[in-house]
Image (tube, coloured by chain):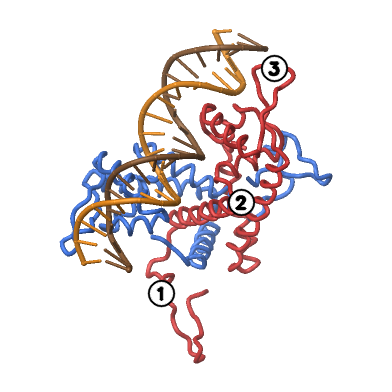
Chain colours: A blue, B red, C orange, D brown
Amino acid sequence: MYRWRVNDRGRETALEPQTAHASPMDAATGLVRLSGLVQAVYQRVSERHELTPVQARLLCVLLDGPRGMAELAGCFGVEKAALTGLMNRAERRGLALRSSVPGDRRAVQVTLTDEGREAALAFHAEMGQEMARLLAPLTEPDRERFRATMAEIVAACGTGHPC
Amino acid sequence: MYRWRVNDRGRETALEPQTAHASPMDAATGLVRLSGLVQAVYQRVSERHELTPVQARLLCVLLDGPRGMAELAGCFGVEKAALTGLMNRAERRGLALRSSVPGDRRAVQVTLTDEGREAALAFHAEMGQEMARLLAPLTEPDRERFRATMAEIVAACGTGHPC
DNA sequence: TATTGTTATACTCTATAACTATA
DNA sequence: TATAGTTATAGAGTATAACAATA
């Protein structure tokens, strides 16, 4: 996506342009590529910690405190039925567990195990390092400006901000 | 910037609600969140075109021209066995097809159907619009600077850039 | 022997729909 | 009735390993 270029004849260019960037990358392409980079790192760091990306995300959300199943489903933007399987696997791996909620006998509370908390913290720390490495080529002023602009975009788009 | 807003009585009020945190969003968090935003849009646009995100990506890659199965697998960073199922579904939906390669009777060439090309172009166009919308809150100079910085990051990290 | 692609199997993630239990 | 969560079923995407055909 957004990697190809169509020449002025409306024909696709051949396999060559992998390195030749005569025209600068447009903003849409930059966003998609940057996002792809971050996702790739996320997956790689997850694997390094023997987690799937979704599990890593679950653990990180739970670092903020216990959550209900429906709450987590809303967090992830998936149906609550999907959380059941997700939690079954997380529980089987000893990363999180369900406990009953005193006031409501329908509800369960999902909490991290000690192992899950350790994994979440380790994952989070390593992601921080990897993201810093991604920004390492920038000068400090550029980095700060980039950070502020990202924050602005996220804030402006924060309509449905799940978690 | 965006820290103050004038209310309907003409008075300046701080807008704390969700965005004005005591501590600003750090760069790593910004990258992960921004990436999440882009991925969410990618998925939403894919669904709007009755594609899965992976199918949308496949079609967009194929806009550059025919590709072999192993080549596509490398593109996607997955095992070639995964491409078989991916292509089976794409072919079943009439988006792409396999054809034989004259010089090599082992190989197949994957090409877009007319329908697949239309879908890819429509998807690509809409993604461009959505990404522009994401950047709409920025001032023009900020947007240009942001674009340039993204390009710099992607270029610097472009060691393994698949496609 | 190396490469291209497929098949078989298993697992994760997700959606939908129907269901139970509780509020 | 509404809410919290589960079960059942289906499908997409992926990995691994074994395989076929061709180079």
Q: Position of residue A14 (x, y in %)?
A: 75, 35
Seen at 69% across and 34% down, the residue is B111
Q: In the displayed orientation, state which residue is furthest to the right.
A: A9
Among the 4 quarters of the image, the one containing residue A123:
top left
x, y (%) of residue B139? 62, 69
Label 1 to label 2, Cα distance in Å? 35 Å
Q: CA distance from mark 2 to mark 3?
A: 35 Å
Judge the density around disc 2: few (<14), some (14-19), many (≥20) Cα neighbours within 10 Å: some
Q: In the displayed structure, does residue B162 sit left or right of residue A45? A: right
Q: Residues within 10 Å of mark 3 (few under 14, many from 20)?
A: few
Residue furthest out toward the left? A102
State the image coordinates of residue B154 (x, y, percent, origin top left). 58, 46
Q: Amino acid at mark 1?
A: Pro
Local secondary structure at mark 2: loop
Query: Sequence-wise, which precedes: disc 3 or disc 1?
Result: 1
Quarter the C terminus of chain B occupies: top right
Q: Residue at x 47, y 65 (%)?
A: A158
The percent position of residue A56, horizontal first and vertical second, equals 36, 46
Report which residue position mark 1 lands on. B17
- Give the chain letter at badge 2: B
- Where does label 2 land, which residue? B49
Do the dots labelled 1 and 2 sit on one chain? yes
Which label was assigned to residue B104? 3
CA–CA distance in space, label 3 to label 1: 63 Å
Looking at the rendered structure, the kind of residue marked 2 is His
Q: Residue at x 22, y 58 (%)?
A: A106
